[in-house]
Image (tube, rainbow, N blue to C red):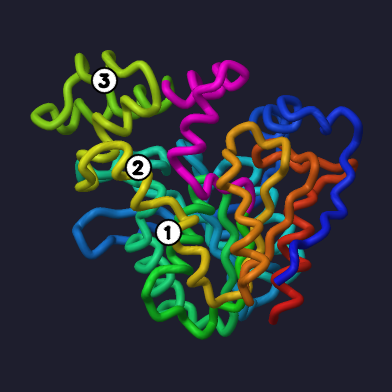
């Protein structure tokens, strides 16, 4: 497919990468009603879905996955849920393992390529609710997970009609190197602190597998992925984890209409996260690279973001 020309023209203040990124993550408010459902997974663990429903019974459902150390309560998720429910969709916002405010039962939690969990969510929703139409929307790490799911060797449900992914680090190693740059120091440090706090809580539940001393010794996201993410999820080390779970490796195999929106001024993304050649040669992958938007930003002079409107437009056009 040809590269999609973006129509996103933000207010002047949101052309700044930092303003767009910080405002959307820490200042924006987008309240929506949510009802929690717990799914007990096949391995004995659980994850929680936060549902938002349209006013009338719907046969369409949007599954949403948040980013690193996020949850279904983040404004980019609730804003999307509010917009889609107003358009007649139900929205199932996934809290990945350990991200719903309660630590999960196993030592493992979530990671950027945990597609088996998404498979269980999809099967559960279709079996329980009998939706005729399904779509995906993923953000950052959640977008990488969903792209990997779409490109893996699996049977995709016929109900899944389209997908939209926003601000996706398709090359996990490259994105880690971007975050290590000086201009991203505060973002990387914030992620590091949140992850270390998460791991300290996990160490209390699994003292034989993780110690506070090991956690405190971590000085970067790479250290954390070496210490925990790779070890807990059966990868050799952080680099092995990044390589095997980067969605860029799976993009050529996607067979569902999928729109990837990565802003050119997203400081979290490496050049490999803009797969122009793959999109040009694909029948199903559409790539849109707005000049602005930051990381999961895309603010406008209206309540909904550009990517919320764009997601509905793209998905609706493929029903």
List x then y, in percent, for residue 15. 83, 32
Q: Tell me where residue 151 appears, x and y as whole percent.
A: 46, 68
Q: What number is the disc on residue 215?
A: 3
Left or right, 212 with respect to 174, comes to left
Magenta highlight: main SS: helix
Residue at (59% x, 80% y) in the render = 133
Q: Is residue 148 above or below residue 21?
A: below
Q: Along the horizontal axis of the image, is 91 left or right of 10?
A: left
**Could you classify mark 1 by the number of other residues whose Cα lies within 10 Å: few (under 14), some (14-19), or many (20 or more)?**
few
Q: Hey, which residue is sitting farthest left in the picture? A: 208
- Counting residues from the start of the chain, the first of labels 2 and 1 encountered is 1
* Lower position in the chain sequence, tag 1 or tag 3: 1
Q: Which residues make up the magenta segment?
A: 166-192
Q: Which residue is mark 1?
A: 37
Q: Secondary structure at mark 2?
A: loop
Q: Nearer the viewer, residue 87 or 107?
A: 107
Is the C-beta separation of discs 2 and 3 under 8 Å?
A: no
Question: Residue at 61% of width from left, 72% of height from top?
Answer: 282
Q: Residue at x 68, y 65 (%)?
A: 286
**Picture quadrant where residue 103 is located:** top left
Pointer 2 local density, CA inside 10 Å: few below 14, some 14–19, many at least 20: many
Marks 2 and 3, the one that precedes in the sequence: 2
| Front tag of 2 and 3 | 3
Around disc 3, counting alpha carbons within 10 Å, would you say few (fewer than 14), some (14 to 19), or many (20 or more)? many
278 on left or right of 235: right
Q: Is residue 54 above or below residue 27?
A: below
Residue 202 visible in image: yes
Of marks 1 and 3, the one in the foreground: 3
User: Rounded to the nearest whole Å, what is the CA distance between mark 2 and mark 1?
Assistant: 14 Å
In the rendered structure, the answer to whether residue 228 lies left or right of residue 163 reads left
Q: Which mark is residue 169?
A: none
In the picture, the disc for residue 98 is: 2
């Amino acid at each position: 497919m040809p590269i999609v020309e973006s129509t996103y023209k933000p207010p002047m203040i949101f052309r700044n990468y930092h303003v767009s990124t910080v405002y959307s993550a820490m200042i924006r408010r987008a309240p929506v009603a949510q009802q929690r459902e717990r799914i007990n997974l096949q391995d004995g663990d659980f994850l929680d879905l936060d549902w938002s429903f349209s006013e009338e019974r719907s046969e369409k459902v949007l599954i949403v996955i948040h980013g690193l150390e996020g949850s279904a309560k983040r404004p980019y998720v609730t804003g999307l849920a509010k917009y889609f429910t107003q358009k007649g969709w139900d929205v199932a916002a996934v809290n990945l393992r350990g991200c719903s405010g309660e630590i999960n039962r196993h030592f493992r939690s979530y990671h950027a390529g945990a597609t088996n969990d998404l498979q269980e969510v999809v099967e559960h929703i279709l079996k329980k609710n009998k939706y005729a139409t399904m779509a995906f929307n993923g953000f950052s790490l959640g977008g990488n997970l969903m792209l990997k799911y779409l490109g893996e060797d699996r049977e995709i449900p016929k109900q899944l009609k389209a997908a939209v992914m926003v601000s996706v680090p398709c090359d996990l190693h490259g994105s880690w190197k971007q975050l290590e740059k000086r201009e991203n120091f505060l973002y990387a440090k914030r992620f590091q602190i949140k992850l270390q706090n998460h791991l300290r809580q996990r160490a209390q539940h699994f003292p034989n597998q993780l110690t506070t001393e090991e956690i405190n010794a971590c000085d970067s996201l790479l250290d954390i992925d070496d210490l925990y993410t790779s070890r807990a999820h059966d990868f050799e080390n952080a680099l092995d984890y990044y390589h095997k779970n980067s969605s860029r490796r799976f993009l050529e195999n996607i067979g569902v209409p999928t729109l990837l929106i990565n802003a050119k001024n997203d400081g979290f993304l490496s050049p490999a996260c803009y797969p122009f050649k793959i999109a040009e040669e694909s029948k199903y992958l559409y790539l849109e690279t707005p000049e602005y938007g930051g990381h999961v930003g895309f603010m406008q002079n209206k309540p909904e973001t550009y990517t919320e409107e764009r997601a509905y437009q793209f998905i609706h056009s493929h029903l």
